[in-house]
Amino acid sequence: MENWGLVTYRESMLLFNDGTASARQGIATVIAHELTHMWFGNLVTTRWWDATWLNEGFAQYFQFYATGLVKPAWRLMEQFVVDHHQAVMGADALPTAAALTSPAHTPAQVSARFGSITYSKGASILRMISAIMGENKFLEALHEYLVENRYSTTIPEDLFQHLVEKSTDSNLDQNAFENLLRSWTEQPGYPVLKIDRNYEEGSATISQARFLLKSQTTPDPTLYYVPLTWVGPGGDFSATAPKAYLAQEQTRTVSGMPEPQQWVIFNVQETGFYRVNYDDTNWRLLSAHLLDPSQPLDGVHVLNRAQLLDDAFNLARAGQLDYAVAFDLADYLQRETDFIPWASALAAFSYLQRMLVRNDRYPVFEAYVRSLLEERYEHFGFRDREGHIDKLFLNRVSAWACSLQHPPCTRAARTALDGLLQGEDVPADLRSVVYCYGVRHSPKESWYVLLERYKISLDNAERALLMAGLACSYDEDLLNELLGYSIQGTFIRKQDAASVFSSVYSNSVGVEVALNFLDEHFDQVEEYYASMGAINNIVVGIAGRLTTHEQRDKMRSFVEMHSESLGNTADAALATVEENLEWLEDRQEIILKILEEKLTSEPTTTQTEPSTTESPTEPSTTESPTEPSTPSTTTDDAESLRATVLAVLALVLAVTML
């Protein structure tokens, strides 16, 4: 928590003995976030909660920007695009999404201003503005904004004034630029651009509409002032300044498209906060290029490879693109060796895994993703890596391989857990995988040994990792026991109780366990939490993972029983389950048929050992760039982190020039 001259941290956000790449990155960026608040938040403070993004959006942006300049090998601005820009697009694609600048008259409205829209969308819009203006002009504008408003409060118009004054884009006069800024901060959501190429004339007609994951009876009329960038084969992917703008109008035509047999990509490096859908021919050209072994993958910028995957699968999820097009594009992943596109792909696969997991033909999905992932798993093995990005990649690939029941991975996890319990070391970046999938495939005794380790551990990061591993069990009795401990207030701290629930319901077996436990012990849970906000979050989280009519009926019975306590959450939870069922009815058979055809028509090198005793699960979510995890390196790592933090502080000072 930022306070001027006294920043306070949870221990896990500050203390780093030794541990994972994710832990080091998380601590460094969180410290940078709080230090940034000395300027954006303390020196200059938003006047009211309706524009909280003036504080939090900047802190979120600079935590990646500043730390990335100190640690370029971490590729933080690229990670930002996947983990924040793309991630928040999901929340912002709901009809209930709020604008960055939104009314905040009640405590509930104020609290709502501290969500992912404020932080991640706020930072994403700032990144887009920087691309429009150019980095130097953007930083100059921020400097003048801070100098003029030091020791005072501001509203968005104060920032806009300095951004507009520093803009030198001849295609964007001052009034137009202010309209652009308002369209992105005062309106919710974002658009999808439809690109229809005229291959004979070398032009493209661009149309826009607000992107929503679920189609509405009445089309949303919201229009945005969109910066347009595009590039073809051999083009300059570093040129992120707009070539043109789509003002708040529905369509316009631009010239200068590539040759008819060549692809075009809009939204270079995904600097713009919007999705792009192409005509069928251009999608085919893109897939063919990425699949062609004679074409180097770096002919398409790594962020645009990630963007294509993220856009394609979300467009398909929303019913705006055939899933066959998305999976044809994803086939290229057998060639992909970079972490960033894989992170986007695995995020898309996570949704499909969660939705399809209870279908009898779910193993088809498992087999397809294994066929894409196997070469990456063989490359990393179950071995420690040296580079920061490789460590993150190792964790993600191993967690997915084990969740997909890849026999070499599950055997390695079980063997590593046996060794760990006998005193052997496990690489820090594999420990979350070992705890989760080792526990899942080991006797109960191993679960209880880890529980005892949790009880005596004084390292909060290690405790979080152990708890996530314990929640990975498929034994319903053990999961119920764990949930019981979470509301006893003995060895599980009260502030960690909600994370126990989320870890259990993230387990495909545990989702019903969590719902049943909440139903049977609601009064006790309500009394222990003393906050309906936490319980509402649990109910919404469970609802997002319910995919059968029987589960829907259980949820309906539960919310009807506790409707008075749950309030609006009751209706929201039921609506979520109904949307899941509707999506499955419309799309699951189509998806599984596509994947069956791919598996039968395209021979793969994957050899798996089918198992009737294993059930599918989602990959471990204990490793994230903002939530540190476990120990296992040297004192040099801590020294390096201290040096990083000091360098970030110096850089923030330099950037603000105060």
Image: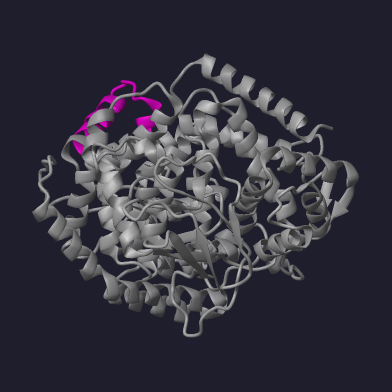
Vertical position of residue 454 compared to residue 95: above or below: above
Q: Residue at x 78, y 55 (%)?
A: 160
Q: Would you identify the image quadrant in which residue 95 lies? A: bottom right
Vertical position of residue 271 compared to residue 95: above or below: above
- Where residue 143 appears, x then y in whole percent? 81, 39
* Magenta span of residues: 410-431
- Helix, strand or loop: magenta stretch: helix
Location of the N terminus by quadrant is top right
Q: Residue at x 53, y 23 (%)?
A: 17
- Where residue 21 appears, x then y in whole percent? 47, 29
Q: Would you identify the image quadrant in which residue 214 lies? A: bottom left
Vertical position of residue 629 compared to residue 480: above or below: above
Q: Is 130 left or right of 97, judged from the image as shown?
A: right
Residue 43 visible somewhere in the drawing: no
According to the image, what is the colour scheme of the structure?
A: one colour
Residue 118 visible somewhere in the drawing: yes
Q: Residue at x 74, y 41 (%)?
A: 137
